[in-house]
Amino acid sequence: MFLRFSLISSALVLFGTTSATAWQQGGNPFDRFDANKDGKVTRDEVPERLRERFDLIDANKDGLITPEEQRTYLRPPGSPGTTDVKVEKDLPYAGTKNPRQTLDLLVPVIAKGSKPLPVVVNIHGGAWQSGDKSQGIGAIMSLVASGEYAGATIGYRLTDEAVWPAQIHDVKAAIRWIRANAEKYHIDPDRIGVIGASAGGHLVAMLGTSGNLAELEGKLGVYPDVSSRVKCVVDEFGPSELAVMMDYPSSVDHRSAQAPESKLVGGAILDKLDVAKSASPITHVSSDDPPFLIIHGDKDPVVPFNQSERLTKALKKAGVDVHFIRVEGGGHGGFQNPELTRRTRQFLDHYLRDQTVGSISEAPVPNKAIAPKK
């Protein structure tokens, strides 16, 4: 059964944590954070893990979020009109009862045009060891609410349950499921784009570079003969070459068996070089890869900035259409410049909707937007 989200009355989709379950339980999520019920949300009222997103919504930087700022964030000035979004939760894509092997599907109540919609699929981050698919709803909600896209967020097995290649097998099975069920949900099976940050960025990059590799396809689900290829990739600061992450400054000891990428491959990277190579998007780059948009902060303390530089160089050498945006002063996500959202939308509109958007700028973007002089 579909559950409906109203973007006019809903609030903290902005924090990227709204779930259909929470909605079903009743109450406006905005009210749940507004502890003193004064109609405004302060930074202190928001859980610490969500405060980076708070800064994006607080347009006038007064330390408060009003319902109007929330609505503006979800529907920026000049953006297409919005529509309600229907969300179908926990669809099993792998033919199992594992809750990690499920996806949430988002479709606009009123789609623009009669043609099937392109779909943007979000894959969550969390160092392959935490997080869940609900994190991705905020990242794609405004796209779906425009009436011009469908969306999906997918879960996958984490490293406490399974090691590589389980994660790529899962996300490929999810893409196959979406493509096989495209007609049912008014989705265009030939226009599937993917977006992810950090570990999610790594997995979307793997989808982009391994589209023709049978050894990474896996046999999950009931659609083994359906393609898992994607139309375009938005990779936000994802690791691309696991074995060299240790060669660059980082707050993480990438040589350790406790490093996230070590847990991914089942042991210290230097002891698992063959697996690390298989799990690295750069290994599989080829000329038939889809277009990439890569975004990375040059002060990232977790995934070295060089990871995206290396992948960009390899993609360009192979003749792939790639756009690389450096976020000046940006760390490991939490970017606070709406120009990045604008360029991402340009990229998706061009490659998924055949829109003429002009050139997509690769000029560096400051982490925080510079306020115009009065």
Image (cartoon, rainbow, N blue to C red):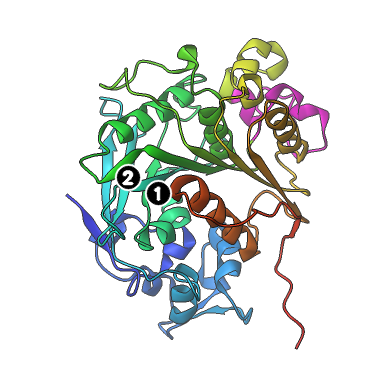
Q: Main secondary structure of the magenta part?
A: loop
Q: Position of residue 69 (x, y in %)?
A: 50, 78
- Which residue position holds label 2? 104
* Amino acid identity at mark 2: Asp
Dot label at residue 134: 1
Q: Position of residue 374 (x, y in %)?
A: 75, 89
**Sequence order check, earlier mark of 1 and 2:** 2
Residue 13 visible in the picture: yes
Circle 1: element type: helix
Residue drawn at point x = 72 percent, y = 60 percent: 367
Label 1 crowd (10 A; few <14 / some 14-19 / many >=20): many
Q: Position of residue 54 (x, y in %)?
A: 56, 67
Circle 2: element type: strand
Q: Position of residue 208 (x, y in %)?
A: 53, 30
Residue 126 visible in the picture: no
Are the two marked residues, 1 and 2, in contact with CB atoms closer than 8 angstroms? yes
Picture layout, residue 64 above or below residue 3: below
Horizontally, residue 71 falls left or right of residue 179, namely right
Q: Quadrant of residue 265?
A: top right
Q: Quadrant of residue 343?
A: bottom right
Label 2 crowd (10 A; few <14 / some 14-19 / many >=20): many
Please check the rendered image and state whether residue 241 is part of the magenta-colored stretch, yes or no. Answer: yes
- Give 46 or 287, whichever is nearer the viewer: 287
Please check the rendered image and state whether residue 306 is part of the magenta-colored stretch, yes or no. Answer: no
* Amino acid identity at mark 1: Ser
